[in-house]
Amino acid sequence: MTVTTDLVSYEDALASYDPVMGLEVHVELGTRTKMFCGCSTGLGAEPNSQTCPTCLGLPGSLPVVNAVGVESAVRIGLALHCEIAEWCRFARKNYFYPDMPKNFQTSQYDEPIAFNGYLDVQLEDGEVFRVEIERAHMEEDTGKSTHVGGATGRIHGASHSLLDYNRAGIPLIEIVTKPVVGAGDRAPEIAKAYVAELRELIRALGVSEARMEMGQMRCDVNLSLMPKGSETFGTRSETKNVNSLRSVERAVRFEVRRHAAVLGGGGTIVQETRHFHEDDGSTTSGRVKEEAEDYRYFPEPDLVPVAPSREWVEELRAGLPELPRVRRNRLREEWGVSGHDMQSILNAGAIDPIVATIEAGADPLSARKWWMGELARSANESGRSLEGLPITPEQVARVAALVADGSLNDKLARQVIEGVLAGEGDPDAVVEKRGLKVVSDEGALGAAVDEAIAGNAAIADKIRGGKVAAVGALVGAVMKATRGQADAARVKELILRKLGVTEG
Ligand code: ADP
Ligand code: MG
Ligand code: ZN
């Protein structure tokens, strides 16, 4: 960035001010069709091939509400402990933008479908912070502009712009928090944890994949400061479209430092939108915020009101899945892991693979061990997610079973996993092809055991003399000679027998 911004240190800022945050999260629903027409929402189609008179805003076209969109909104509202409106309408939010052909966005204004809820988020140290939800409302996405000819891809300096309306009309749910107060110096962490928890929740509900890197979930970060001890909110800035968890955390941190510098220098904060820059974590001024009145909201005359019956709402409530935080706490107890370990498992995206591996018959300990060990390493190296690895939970469970029944030891099991990942087939096929079996047969091990004893006469004497603990060195020699395939327990037994020693 060429723009330099005055900042104070984060610590100094927090010594003088209390931050207040507001998080607005947009989630693109995974419905098959758009919110107000039957056009497909599929990704990757030819530009403007998934459009119709309604989503292009042509005169005379009429919208119809997508029932799955409404159902998703109600389920999200319920999962966020919101009240569900008995009756609510859509509204027109009027403004002109080339990627919005109707010249208004169909949204909800003063009658959101869900309101007054909360989401409990768990912080790194286990503490739970409650974020209050103001509203969750339904709206539609805009089209997409591509600015061509400039150096930056921004409209500034471009020679012309291309418009793709395939995204116009895709259902969005906007979830808005009440002002988050009392976060103190944990504001950046809380903001990130909130968005992370919300993403887990959305995925658990199955209403969206909520992939931030694909724009399926985006966050606007509002922030203001008030002098310590004051209870009057300061003027907020609104950093738009922050598209990763890490960026949410950085945007809050940056704005705290910037606001503190402005206020500390006797300046005033202007209410404006700002852009976040991934490269250095800074924000720069966007546009001065219009007043809400500028949008001339009015109820949408072409759509019937949405009036979810209480029976239906209760049916949806009864069908909600276990909330992610509750589920994590349950699994943490079932698996007997610490909060810290559970956090690592969550961060690694390993919860579902581990659960599926246990369901396929593995015990929790080994399921965890393989996904958080060998497989996490492999995913890391190949830049993939755990679920993107070419191995199934069933295959991992089979490896665990082969270890449990003594057919494989850990070293051989790692080779089996390596083989599966390399596309050599199921664990049993890899065992077969690579000849990976624990050898415990006395006939096969006898020669290696004799050699180990003969080659380590001094140690063998010690053992004969009663120092049984020294047997480890001989077992190691046999393991080496058999390239890890010997059954270590069996080898130990054979060595001690040949030396005429009984254990214990
Ligand atoms: P807008 O449409 O202007 O973005 P919204 O009400 O939709 O307004 O969202 C504003 C967000 O900012 C909400 O999450 C709200 O709780 C929060 N907020 C409101 N006032 C402040 C403030 N002074 N400081 C920080 N956040 C605020
Ligand atoms: Mg906003
Ligand atoms: Zn359409």
Image (cartoon, rainbow, N blue to C red):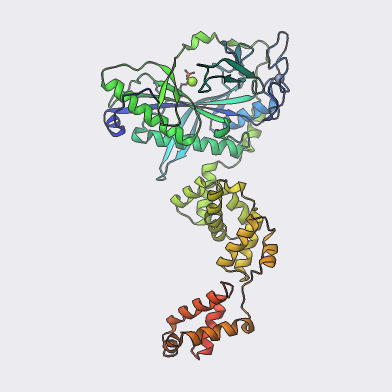
* Residue at 60% over, 59% down: 418
In the displayed structure, 486 sits above or below 502; it is: above
| Viewer-side residue, 6 vs 328 | 6
In percent of the image, x 72 and y 14: which residue is there?
53
Q: Is residue 110 above or below residue 258?
A: above
Q: Position of residue 451 (x, y in %)?
A: 54, 85
Across and down, in percent, residue 107 comes to 59, 18
In this figure, what is the number of numbered marks?
Answer: 0
Ligand 3 - quadrant of the structure image: top right
- The answer to whether residue 494 is visible is no
**Residue 49 appears in the rendering:** yes
Q: Is residue 253 left or right of residue 154?
A: left
- Image quadrant occupied by the N terminus: top left
Q: In which quarter of the view is residue 90 placed?
A: top right
Relative to residue 51, is residue 264 drawn left or right? left
Front-lying residue, 281 or 41: 281
Residue 146 percent coordinates (x, y): 59, 21
**Residue in view at x 31 percent, y 27 percent:** 7
Q: Position of residue 160 (x, y in %)?
A: 59, 15
Q: What residue do we see at 43% from left, 85% from top?
A: 459
